[in-house]
Amino acid sequence: MYSNIILPKQWSRFTCFCRSLSSIEGQKLPQSSKSSDGISPPPRIPRSPTDILQALAATVGADPTAAHYKYHDDPYLIPLSNFRKRAYALSAEAGRKAAAWIRDEHAEWFTTREWDPPGKMKTPYFNADPIIDAFAPRPIYNDESKVTEEDLKKTIEHALLDDSIKIFQLLGGVEGVTDNNLKLSFLQLLCFYNEKEPDSLEWLEERWFSANTKDRHAATWKLGGLADKIFASLEQKTPEAYCTVIQGMAKHYQAERAYMLCQEAIEHGIPLSTSVFNTLLGCIGFLKEGTALRIETLKQLLAQMEELGLSPNEETLTSCLRSISAWGGGKVLQKMAQQILSEFRQLGIQPGLSAYYYLLCLFCKERGPRIDILSNILTDLENREKLIPKETTDTNFFITAMGICSDHLQDIDMAERLHALLMKDDNYKLVGDAYKESIYYRHFVTVACRHASFERKTQLLDTLVPNVYVPEPSVMEEIIKTLEVAGAGDRLTQAWSQLVIFGIANRTRLVERLLSAMCSCYEFQTNDIKVKIRDAASEILKFGKLTEEDGKNNNNDRRSPQKRLSADAITNIIELCSDVKDKSDPAWDTISEGLQRLKQTEATGVPTKPQVLADLAQKAASMGKLGIAATALQYLAECGFEEASPASVDTLAVILNRPQQEVETMLQQRSDIERALHPSALAVLDAYYMAKTGAPTRDSGSSTSSDSDSESSSDDE
Amino acid sequence: MNNSLIKLSKSHLSSKSQILPWAAITESHIHTSAPMCRVVSGKYRITKKRDRPLTYEMANPPHYIAHRKTWNSWNTSSLKDGLRRSETVLEDEFIRRFMTGTWHGLMCSEIIVKRQFNHIRVAAIVRRAISPTKMYFLLGYTEELLSNWLQCPVTLELQTVDSFKDVVFKYI
């Protein structure tokens, strides 16, 4: 019975084995020979393990309406503002880091290794071959650790700088390690990272969100550091050792020592590599002062390369241009750069993205003349089959080029071409990090807002905002401006909700801009959009009040004093809200609220459009909202606007339903008109006299009662 | 079956007359009764006040699996020639306990463990009782720790609800 089961198993294994054999053979079969039946299978294409996945991924494009896939797909967990995007991604990574810390600190809890299925087991206990290092706890090295040279080798391989330094010291330092090759590779590691632990590749988000301020252009090389000691201790200084140390010094701007060592090596007849000269070319600025001297040194170095029979490569071109662009601007340098470029072209070396970046830096200065070298560069790049990133500075190209499109050339077509290039294939990885990405889009959206057609603008904003890019306040202002020009009232109301979501609704300047935009295009809108705009306006007022109360509650942790909406903005709100035909419309509440704030001088400044308030008073009076009319007029009178007295006359004319002349004659005799008026309208009268004489005639005790407008008063009229 | 066994033994005994006196003993002492076929596991008892909240998953007894609800563990270990049966069960249980402990008081549903190739996807519904930032921290933490233990990529697929009441299907 048991044999019955086992036999098919073994049989299947045997067939499997046969199949693998035949497939191996099939790979080796030369494809030129035709088989007897005339069928010749195509030659085997070697594939990498992820090729199929990449092919599958290429069939679907990125969906700009969805959040980035690093965020969890749940409404609660999707970030909508820049701050949240950063906070969410980094907290997930913080969790990962916490887990990794537990794994390393408590390695004893992570000793289990998943078992292979019994049929595939190779050893009885430890299987799951090969070990997956990524899941195993990392060893922690301290003073008590027993280490061997093997450990050092391993840590160097994994570029764990701090660990390898620790092991090196445990092994007895310079004297303890005898293997010269090991020493050399350790030296290479030290020189590459300048004895500083690099940011781990494992923590992607941290790298993505880190503000790129680290590449300081200063001599950071540690003089007399471990690298120098190891180099001095090498009894037989091989060419590799020389190359390593010179490159390390030059990379970290210790130019003089590097240059000295280089000359020493040449004197001793030690062969040097092209990359040594490349790095030296990159730090000429630290070696010599003055443009003329620097150019001379540059030429000298290049000549030296030729003497030594070293052929330059793409990197040589990049570092030449890098040096030149760092020396400032001017015709001489620009000419020099063009010369170098054409000479390298003759050698068949095409400039890479970094080289183009430095060229752009050199030619397109902020206040310099407009030089359009970008179109040629773009044509060249568009014709290339693929953009291959080679250096870290390659990621600077797109952001700089877009900045030039926006500020220097102010050309939307060029910007669109550049953006199309970035979106081609997987060029998007060249965008750099979060900081660069947002600057890139800031430039792009700004130039689009200024120069693109309205349809293109809205299409662009709809795809980019908010998942790809959240506009900063300055860009938002630009957007509001374009919406105002286009008279898109509907989008202006949306802009308000976007302001709230993006967390920039407390920027007073922005809100004021939005309100004036709403006002200026209000009259051209259809009725339902008018309603929307009115709602948005009253929301703005409410939001301002909310944040103020919020600020009062936690006064201590407010970094800057809350700016209040200006009187202009509030008049705008009042103007928008006063366009209602219904007496019971909630907009009247907003108006009276706004008037209160004006009166209690909670708003900064005085309105520039007092006519709005004068009109409001008449309108309110005609609808029987005497309180509102009176408050508006009183405010006008208090502020000393000359509109106050004619407006009071007009309002009284409306209240009394008499022609203006008659009202004016009645106003000569105060007691007459007081008798004719309802008590709640007396405040209007006060306002008139205040405007006439400049001081309140009656005690203000009775006028405060008019703040709340009673419905009964309107019934009497 | 018990009955037939007795009959068999009886006939066997009766054929051999010398142990006939034993017959009476066997007959009187083996007691048989009808089996109680009541299935209790995976079902919830009705409370007196009818106030026990049940989620949809709890409200459907096991025999509705694949009819009204699905499995809580998705894997191929129970197929013919399936591998790692016991390990899979143990790991799934470990994942469930780890999740309920780490997301303490937040889990509102059963934890679904789905295995595809070398990838484990863990799905659940959680309450919005903590801030999204903390939730993201826990997400990264859980994924990383579990993948270190199970030595394969682990992905959490969470959905959030406002309160536990949102997942209550009925009260019994």
Image (tube, coloured by chain):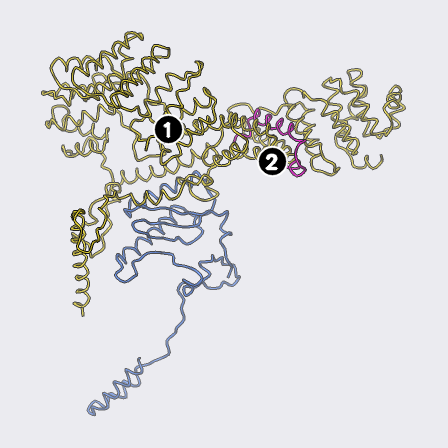
Chain colours: A yellow, B blue
Closer mark to the observer between disc 2 and disc 1: 2
* Residue A283 placement (x, y as % from top left): 27, 16
Query: What kind of residue is marked 1?
Result: Ser
Instruction: Tell me the magenta residue range.
Output: A503-532
Query: What kind of residue is marked 2?
Result: Asp
* Residue A179 placement (x, y as % from top left): 10, 28
Residue at the image point whose x is 41% and y is 16% from the top: A365
Q: Nearer the viewer, residue A570 or B35?
A: A570
Q: Which mark is residue A490?
A: 2
Asked if residue A600 shows in the view, the reply is yes
From the image, tell me which residue sits under label 1.
A210
Classify B82 as above or below A324: below
- Per the picture, the main secondary structure of the magenta-coloured stretch is helix
Q: Which of disc 1 and disc 2 is earlier in sequence?
A: 1
A472 sits to left or right of A218: right
Q: Could you tell me how far apart the alpha carbons at marks 2 and 1 are, in whole angstroms?
A: 38 Å
- Local packing at callout 2 (Cα closer than 10 Å; few below 14, some 14-19, many 20+) is some
Q: Specify the quadrant of the image occupied by residue B85.
A: bottom left
Q: Specify the quadrant of the image occupied by residue A543.
A: top right
Residue at the image point whose x is 31% and y is 13% from the top: A336
Quadrant housing the C terminus of chain A: top right
SS of the residue at dot 1?
loop
Classify A476 as above or below A252: below
Residue at the image point whose x is 72% and y is 35% from the top: A580
Quadrant housing the N terminus of chain A: bottom left
Residue at the image point whose x is 30% and y is 39% from the top: A102
Image mark 1: chain: A
